[in-house]
Image: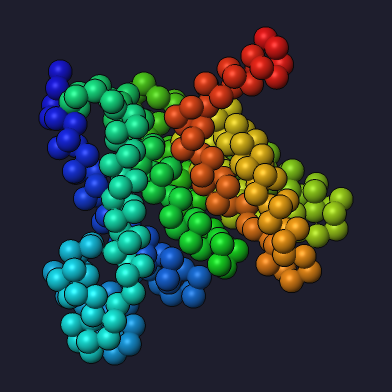
Amino acid sequence: MEIFPLWYGLIVFFVIGACVGSFYNVVVYRMPRGISLVNPPSHCPLCKKRIPLYLNLPIVGWLMLRGKSACCKQPISPIYPIGEALCGLLGALALFSTNYSVGITGNVEDWASALAMFWLLLGIYPVCAVDFKYKLIPDTISVGGIAAGLLISLIPGGVTPLESLIGAVGAGGGLFLLGWGASKVLKKEAMGFGDVKLLAGYGALMGFTGAVEVLVVAAVLGIVVMVPWAKFHKGDGSGQIPFGPFLAVAAPAIYLWGKTLLDLYLKFVIGE
């Protein structure tokens, strides 16, 4: 039974995504600097004056102010509305990618898939923004992903709570042991603990098998990108690319097309 049209759901998910993007802007700025995400409240970074709620609306607030702060008239970076708009589009894409019908139905499995995709897609922004620059992964995304996965597993029709728990423990623990062993062999840190927690979150969202597929695809993407990149940046340290963004990009792809990719691999590589 149709609850409301798909176009209406896309608008709602865009708005929610933009609001989450506004919060992620705070995460991207404050988390690497060790600043609390809630205190102090939103304020002008120049004169420290508190920003009223109506001027802090995602995208709209920046447009109302024409890109300048209301208090000291200094330019506000366009990266903020761009990040909010990107998250809004990813939020709408999360719903669209899991429900291609002309209307949204009351099927709880569809809602579970949409919520999982919402978390996976929007997580790309803060993971890439922070990990590329600071070599850190926000706990808001990694540990939050574990909590989100366990909560979504309570919705019937998707990953069960037991599968979610096994996925989180198995994927996170397995990657930790793999990184620990590689560090011993290479005699340097081979895997950051942020990557471990991030994969544990993906295990909670899509189960152990899905998380393993994410790890494999991320590793392939990493090799394809990092090998030629390193050749162009020899000796200056800029050839190092963190692994977290590859995990973040691979996760929603596996959630949508994991079974298809596995079938293609078994058919063309293994020959089954």
Q: Residue furthest top?
A: 272
Q: Which quarter of the figure is the C terminus placed in?
A: top right
Relative vertical location of residue 204 with respect to residue 38 in this rendering, above or below? above
Nearer the observer, 142 or 241: 241
Image position, residue 67 (x, y; %): 24, 75
Can see residue 207?
no
Question: Residue 74 placed where, x, y %?
Answer: 27, 86
Name the side, left or right, on which 36 lies relative to 235: left
In percent of width and height, residue 156 lies at 34, 23
The answer to whether residue 25 is left or right of residue 224 is left
Q: What residue lies at 39% left-to-right and 37% top-to-bottom?
A: 116
Q: Toward the viewer: 115 or 83?
A: 83
Instruction: Specify the color scheme.
Output: rainbow
- For the image, the number of numbered tags is 0
- Pick the residue in front: 59 or 224: 224
Decide if residue 95 is in sight here. Answer: yes
Residue drawn where x is 34% and y is 46% of the image: 90
Instruction: From the viewer's side, name the closer residue of 204 and 46.
Output: 46
Q: Tell me which residue sits at (45%, 46%) in the image.
A: 145
Q: In which quarter of the image is the N terminus?
A: top left
For residue 99, which quarter of the picture? top left
Measured from the top left, where is residue 164 in percent x and y?
49, 32
Q: Residue at left 75%, top 58%? A: 231
In the shown orientation, is residue 215 left or right of residue 52?
right
